[in-house]
Amino acid sequence: METSDKYGFRVEWSEEDGEYVGICAELPSLSWVAKTAEGALRGIRKVAKEAVRDMAASSEPVPEPFATRRYTGELRVRLPSSLHRRLTIEAAERRRSLNRLIVDKLTGT
C-alpha cells in the first residue's frame, strides 16, 4: 500500500466554485475541484499520489499519514496566566481536575 493511500481526504462543497473540492490533510497545498463529490475524491487521491511520487523522486521528505502517527495523548499548551488561574478555579468549583475540565471544553461535553 502506498503512503498516499493512508492519507486523510475530505470533500466539501464550494459555493464559490459551484463544485466539490477534494483536499488532503497531509498535503494542504493540494486540492481538486469536480462536479461530483466522487470526482473530487478521485482527483485529490490521484494528485496526492503523484505529489508523493515526485517528492520521493527528488529526495524531499514525504509527510507521514496522520493515521499512522503515534500520539501520546499529552499536549503542552501555553496560555496567559490569568486564563490558567481562571480555569484552575473553575475546575476546583466543579470538583474535577484541570485536565478533565479542559478536555470537556475541547470536546464540548
Image (spheres, rainbow, N blue to C red):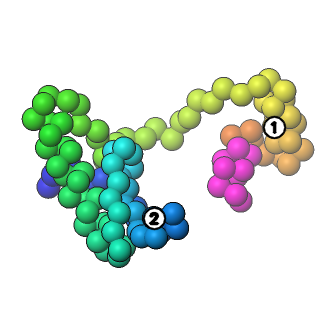
Residue at 80% x, 23% y is 81
Question: Which quadrant holds the N terminus?
Answer: bottom left
Instruction: Residue 108: say if magenta.
Output: yes
Left or right, 55 with reference to 103: left
Q: Can residue 8 be seen in this view?
A: no
Label number found at residue 87: 1
Q: Which of 87 and 12 is in front in this view?
A: 12
Q: Name the residue under label 2.
A: 17
Query: Which amino acid type is marked by label 1?
Result: Leu
| Vertical relation: 69 (above or below) 18 | above
Q: Residues within 10 Å of mark 2 (few under 14, many from 20)?
A: few
Instruction: Residue 33: say if magenta.
Output: no
Q: Quadrant of residue 91?
A: top right
Query: Which amino acid type is marked by label 2?
Result: Asp
Residue located farthest toward the front when viewing the structure as drawn? 17
Secondary structure, mark 2, is loop
- Helix, strand or loop: magenta stretch: helix
x and y percentages locating residue 93 in the rendered image: 89, 44
x and y percentages locating residue 89 in the rendered image: 87, 36
Tell which circle, 1 or 2, labels the residue nearer the N-terminal end: 2
Q: How many labels does the image show?
A: 2
| Span shown in magenta | 100-109
